[in-house]
Structures are given as C-alpha cells and as structure tokens.
Amino acid sequence: MKHVTISKLIGFGLVILLTASLVNAKGDDFGSVVKMIEQFYNVKHEGIPFLAKAGMKVVGTAAKIKGGTAKRLAEVGSIKLAVFEDQEFDGDLIKFRNSLNEALKQSWIPLVQTLSATDEEQSYIFVREQGNKFNVLVINIAQHEGTVVQATLSSKNLALLMKDPEGAGKNITNEATIIDQE
Amino acid sequence: MRLVFQRISIIPVLVVLLVIVSATAGHAQEPRIQMSHLDYLAAKATETVDVNIDERLVQIAIKVFSDKDPDEAQIKKLVAGLKGIYVKSFEFDADNQFSAADVDSIRNQLREPAWSRLVNVRSKRDSNVEVYVSLSGTSVNGLVVITSEARELTVVNIVGPVDLEKLAHLEGSLGIPDLGIEITKPKTKNEDQ
C-alpha cells in the first residue's frame, strides 16, 4: 500500500516536472515580460485577451474607419497584448533593460532598443524564429503608460520590420492597440 | 617505462603547439569590439539607440529579404557574409556629456597591426569621423566607425567582409543611423598643381 502511494507520488511529481518543462519549452515569455514589468515598476497591466484574439480583421476594419494607411504586419489572431495605463513607471532604465535582456536572451534576439533617459521612454524589439514564421516582441514604456505586444509575422513582414525597425515596431503596436482606441 | 618517457617528451611539444594555436586563434579573432562600457551614458542621453544584428539575425535577414524587391535585394547582397552589425548611438541635450576617455576606450581596441585607420574619410555633417578597418590577409573582415559631435556619439561595428561603400548603402536600414560618411579621393599630382 505504502509502495503504491510512493509510486503515485513519484508519478505525480514527474507529471508536474514534465508539465513545467513543457511550459518552459513553449516559453511564454510574453507573460514573463508582463510580470517582470509589473514587479520592476510596481504597476498593473490590463489584458485585452478577447479583443486581441478577435483577430486582425477587426483591426483592418478599424483602420479603414479611421482612414489609416498603416500596413498590416501581424498574422491574423496572433497578437498578445498587455496595456499599462495611468501608471508610474519610475525606475532605473538601464537596470530594467539589463534585466529584460537577461530574461530573454535564451530564446529571443534583440533587434533594436531605444531609450530616452530625459523623456523616460524605452522601446525594445525582440525577434525569434517559429517554424517558417517569426515572433516579434515589442515593448514600449513611457512615463505613465506601456504596452507589450507579441505577434507572429510572415517572413515578408519581418523583412519590413528589419528594414525599418522603429517604424514597423510602431505599426505593430498600433495594430494591437487600435482596437482599444475604437 | 619507455612509453612513459615518450609521453613526457610529448608534453612540451603539445604545450608549444597549444601556444601556437592559441596565438593564431587570437590573431584570427573576430573583429567585434566591446561597447557595453558606454552603456552608462544612456542614463543622461536624450536618446540611446542600440542595434544588435548578430549572425543569427543576419541569416534571418538573408532568408527573409526578397530578391524581387530592389531595396531588399540590395540589403540582402550587402549583409551576405556579415557576422554582425552593432550600433550604439547617444544623443544629449547638453555639451560634454561624454568624455575623451569614452572615445579612447573604443580607440584603444583598434590598435595596429590588427586595425588600420582610414584617412580619406570625412563627415558630410560637422562631426568628427574615424573609420578603422580590420584586415585578414588582404581582405577586410571588420569595420568600426566612431562619429562624435558636441552632443552626439555613435559607434558602429560591422563584423565580416565589409567596406565603406557597403556601409553607406546600409545607412538608414536595419536600424543603422545616417552617419553622413563621405569618402574623399586622394588628390593626384595634377590636381595639386
């Protein structure tokens, strides 16, 4: 009886370990980055999972309504978005950048990072391969607001991002947040 | 016993070989320079731009840039063979925010014989520009550009076969800032007269 219980416990432990490693392998870095920002700056995000999952069709329509000409970059339904509004992002920019780079260095490649100490603004673009497509992680933090966007891009749109990282990074953030503005 | 002596006599030879291999490896080291010590400047800069296009991203760029699009085809051709493009750029809202020691910390890594400074280069803008190339045999395998103004400091390091013309074409793409580099032709005797 005791033997069975121990076996069950070991089995249960193994399942937990396996699940944990699978989750880790999948690498939900989006969630980790959001959590990291929350802990570092003592802020709280507002997730918009439903709207983000609604896909880029909505964004396309919204862009048309707004008369926008922004090129759609993200793959349909691939956007993960976390928004920080009316919060105080008061902290050491360099320390945050170092922590972020350290946390993502295993699975993401930093493309461009811009900081402004005087305006207290930061933006980061990370890229990683996912099969024949690419994931992009765009993080923007200003004094009182921030966004974290993860999206999947086709190779064609990654080329656009690489050609003009700043412009395309802004486009991706706009695509993700335009729903919120409507 | 004889075998033991044979082994002992081999050790010094191995040590010498190791030293030679290490020295060769050191000489053939990739011309990537250290720039992270400049990071402290970001704390007082109005804008800091950090571009890190490592070999993985270069490979991705080659994969994703189209041959049909003339712009992309050109960038693809330019980055082919490169092992990395690294840029650190700082802009300040006041003078003297970076010191000569900051620039020297980069210059000190660019010593001869591995690095040579190009003299026929100037800036289209009012900035000091220094260009250094790393040579492997007769071919360039690395390039460093330092541009400095009263309120701006930019360091570009390209690892791999590159020349100034290539860099000039890459300006404005891949996050590389517009450096305003101009290659001046050396004057001929006739022009001097």
Image (cartoon, coloured by chain):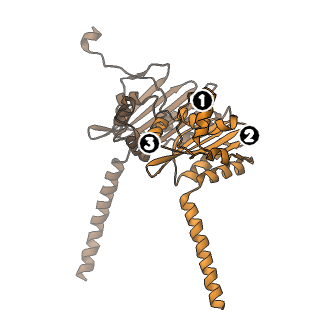
Q: Quadrant of the N terminus of chain A?
A: bottom right
Q: Position of residue B149 (x, y in %)?
A: 53, 24
The residue at the point 59 percent across, 79 percent down is A11
* Figure disc tally: 3
The reply to whether residue A68 is visible in this rendering is yes
In front of the other: A77 or A31: A77
Disc 1 marks which amino acid? Lys
User: Rounded to the nearest whole Å, what is the CA distance between mark 1 and mark 2?
Assistant: 25 Å
Q: Is residue A3 left or right of residue B11?
A: right
Report which residue position mark 1 lands on.
Answer: A64
User: Mark 3, chain letter?
Assistant: A
Label pair 2/3, CB-CB below 8 angstroms: no
Q: Position of residue B105 (x, y in %)?
A: 50, 38
Report which residue position mark 3 lands on.
Answer: A155
Q: Is residue B59 left or right of residue B187?
A: right
Report which residue position mark 2 lands on.
Answer: A85
Q: Nearer the viewer, mark 3 or mark 1?
A: 1
In front of the other: A91 or B145: A91
Q: Position of residue B141 (x, y in %)?
A: 34, 40
